[in-house]
Amino acid sequence: MRDAELLEKLERIQGLLGRSFVRYIADVASPFTEDDWDRRALEALASWSADTARSEEALNALLLEEKVHVAPPSWPIHFAQYNLIRPTHVLAMVMRDMDGHLAQLREEAAGLAQWPEEARLVTGMLEKEEEHLRAIEALERDRPKPPPKPGVKKGVSANFW
């Protein structure tokens, strides 16, 4: 029998995993691809989402053993602005949002020190999440940027003559 405080922490961690931005982009937002970089970005996001889903399922199984039924989390409404966008366009937002998301997960995981089995499980999940974030950062860094637009030369207005 697990402690009620532990179960609450695991529930919060499971909720964070369930409503991550990466999961939304890969599973719900229906991103479309136009080129090889889009496909690479979508594959990286889908891989991250699949690992996050497996981590969430592992936590869910642990909670179900204790007869804790977690309601599926709802997505934050501001995620909807990223529907139907190319994956390469959201990489910067994914990095920014998931960095904060991982900070929340680390904060929740810090309180698991007195439960070694659960702490190992959550630490392993965090390591996978951070590995995926580094992969996304490398992909964004390597992606060719569009050339800058040439400056517009302004003419002289007739009003000044």
Image (cartoon, grey):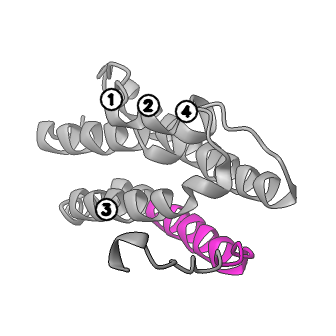
Q: Can residue 118 be seen in this view?
A: yes
* Marks 2 and 3, the one that precedes in the sequence: 2
Helix, strand or loop at disc 3?
A: helix
Quarter holding residue 128: bottom right
Judging by the rendered image, the residue that carries numbered circle 3 is 100
Tags 4 and 2 in contact by the CB under 8 Å rule? yes
Q: Which residue is the site of mark 1?
A: 77
Which residue is the extreme one toward the front?
161
Indicate which disc, 1 or 4, sits on the residue closer to the N terminus.
1
Q: Residues within 10 Å of mark 3 (few under 14, many from 20)?
A: few
For the point 57% across and 60% down, the residue is 91
| Residue 83, numbered label | 4
**Callouts 2 and 1 close, C-beta under 8 Å:** yes
Which residue is tagged 2? 80
The quadrant where residue 49 appears: top right
Within 10 angstroms of label 2, few (less than 14), some, or many (20 or more) residues?
few
- State yes or no: residue 136 in magenta: yes
| Three-letter code, disc 3 | Gly
In the shown orientation, is residue 7 left or right of residue 69? left
Q: In this view, does 75 lie above or below 5?
A: above
